[in-house]
Amino acid sequence: MVPDLPPLPALTRAEGELIDAYLEVVDLLGKINPSRGTHTYGALRAAQALVSRAEALREALTLMHMRGESEVHAETLARALRVLDGERRTDRVTVPRTRAS
């Protein structure tokens, strides 16, 4: 059985789009990460897709700004990222630790 996840916090539509686009960018960066990858073709495809996802991220932030959402509610957005497995997903972007011998 899959454990019940906490509900997503209340987000504006633009905040939801920001979170979605951010995680898509993170996922692609994880695929491009040379310290974790195994094939150049997969990294190349991820790099190509990164352009459009970065544009979506920019558009979400632009929309927030144009709607007067001038502040980022970091605590609320961090909760949303945790519910959406953001900690594991962002870990793929980092360089793996070496194992002590």
Image: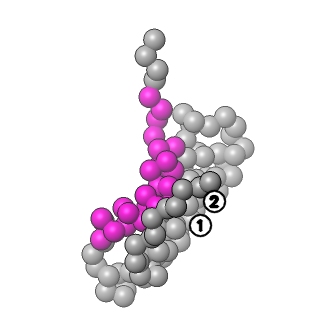
Residue at the limit of the structure toward the right, as seen here:
41
Q: What residue type is labelled 2?
A: Ala
Asked if the magenta segment contains residue 76, the reply would be yes
Q: Tell me which residue sits at (50%, 55%) in the image.
A: 85
Asked if 97 appears above or below 15 in the picture, the reply is above
- Seen in the image, is 51 located left or right of residue 87? right
Where residue 50 appears, x then y in whole percent?
A: 58, 58
Q: Quarter holding the N terminus?
A: bottom right
Q: Which amino acid does label 1 sit on?
A: Ser
Where residue 99 appears, x then y in whole percent?
A: 46, 20
Q: Which of 83 and 44 is in front in this view?
A: 83
The span picked out in magenta is 73-97
- Seen in the image, is 69 located left or right of residue 101? left
The residue under label 2 is 49
Q: How is the image coloured?
A: one colour
Where residue 94 appears, x then y in whole percent?
A: 45, 40
Asked if 6 appears above or below 16 in the picture, the reply is above
**From mark 1 to mark 2, how far is it between C-alphas?**
6 Å
The residue under label 1 is 52
Q: How crowded is mark 2: few (under 14 residues within 10 Å), some or many (20 or more)?
A: some
Residue at the limit of the structure toward the front, as seen here:
1
